[in-house]
Amino acid sequence: MIEYWNPQIERMPVDELKKVQEQKLCQLVKYVYEHSPFYKKRFDDAGVKPEDVKTLDDVTKLPFTFKKDLRDTYPTGMFCVPNNKLVRFHVSSGTTGKPTVVGYTDNDIKAWSTSLARALTSIGVGRDDVMQIGYGYGLFTGGLGMHYGAEEAGCTVLPTSSGNTERQIELMQDLGSTVIACTPSYLLFMIEAARDAGISFQDDTKLRVGVLGAEPWSEEMRKRIEDSTGIKAYDIFGTSELSGPLFTECQYQNGIHIWADQFLVEVIDPDTGEPVANGERGELVITTLVKEALPLIRYRIGDITVLNWDECECGRTHPRIMRVLGRADDMLIVRGINVFPGQVESVLMDIPEVGEHFMIIVDRVNELDIMKVQIEMTDAAFSDKVTDIMDLEKKVAAALKSVLNIAVKVELVEHGSLPRSMGKAKKVIDNRKI
């Protein structure tokens, strides 16, 4: 049976939904023009006034917002409310330059929690579930975001955060966790640790659902996780600038539902900034329609995806973004060919002898780009015969070349030799000086 958190909104006819978006967009533009000196200047520089925005199509008159804008106005230069109206700050890691700071009013927290409650309900998670949250808590949005959303959906929450894996597995068994929320990389790490301890996720836990995100992962990786654990693995999406985790797939696992009464979604050509046709691949752009503290106008997410407005099998009319291929800035250009780490993962996970862990290494030798992929073999595939290993390397190299259209050096390594991650996995080392 299909369940809804708010069927009236989730199944609203598309024409009515777009009228709601139109009304909220016009209100938003007026709000930020009056309350954000940053947006007033940005609109004035672009020659746009609030009265110029009357329909959804007029959104293209508005300038884009970039992550750089948040850093340039650090810490709170883009906020629309004073600090005494805020109930929380979250801060990004700031690994390159200044971090980004996001503030939340009480209404912002409620809207965030509602978004996730709708999403979790759509995958059948609710009052009868114990959700173990393995995302990091604190300045990072993942842990607390999932925590509030899961409680809103009626779950009992087990806030383990990331790390302390042996304890995680013990609590999963002792407290009967039915849902795990973490990165795909960390779940793989937990599966390995459990297996080493003689514990089967499928036979020795009550786990039935995984809510996995914060890094790109492929359909092939999903199949591996589901086959090895017996759970249903669902993709989750959000960014720290928007409010952390916000949306998931529904039970049909065919695209992530974006709640159109809260967010306006576009997909654009990353080079020209022009909208692409429905169903075409491009860069994700999101406008927040209900945020009070830090609303964002046409925020360029950087993720490459496809927008789908077709009604889903679940009956929800809100648009879906299809599985994110990767980030525009994560894309590698090797000898003029565009390569996403997700494409490599998709190929590798279709080869039974290959394990779940790999590393892409790009070097430049004599002005020529060289791409190497280090890949762990499964224990079953490991052989002392040099010819067996060479044959497998050729098989993998041929499969990669057929998809990437570029020759790739393949190096097979023993299981357990590549680094593991308890958060977002690092899968690319680019040694070129570009």
Image: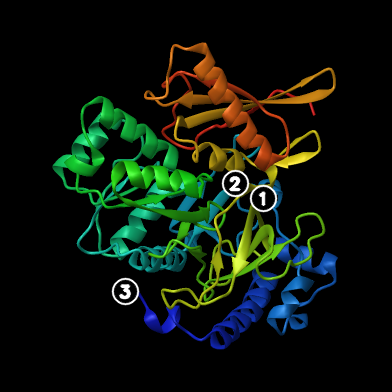
Which of disc 1 and disc 2 is earlier in sequence? 1
Q: Residue at x 48, y 46 (%)?
A: 220
Q: Three-letter amino acid code at disc 2?
A: Thr
Asked if the residues shown at circle 2 and circle 1 are in contact, with their CB atoms under 8 angstroms apart, the answer is yes
Circle on res. 67: 1
Q: Which residue is mark 3?
A: 3
Q: Three-letter amino acid code at disc 1?
A: Lys
Side of 168 where 135 appears, left or right: right
Expressed as whole percent of the image width and height from the top left, the position of residue 133 reads 32, 47
Side of 188 where 302 appears, left or right: right
Circle on res. 213: none
Within 10 Å of disc 3 (Cα), the crowding (few <14, some 14-19, many 20+) is some
Within 10 Å of disc 1 (Cα), the crowding (few <14, some 14-19, many 20+) is some
Q: Eyeballing the image, is 226 above or below 376? A: below
- Indicate the colouring scheme: rainbow
Q: Residue at x 82, y 59 (%)?
A: 272
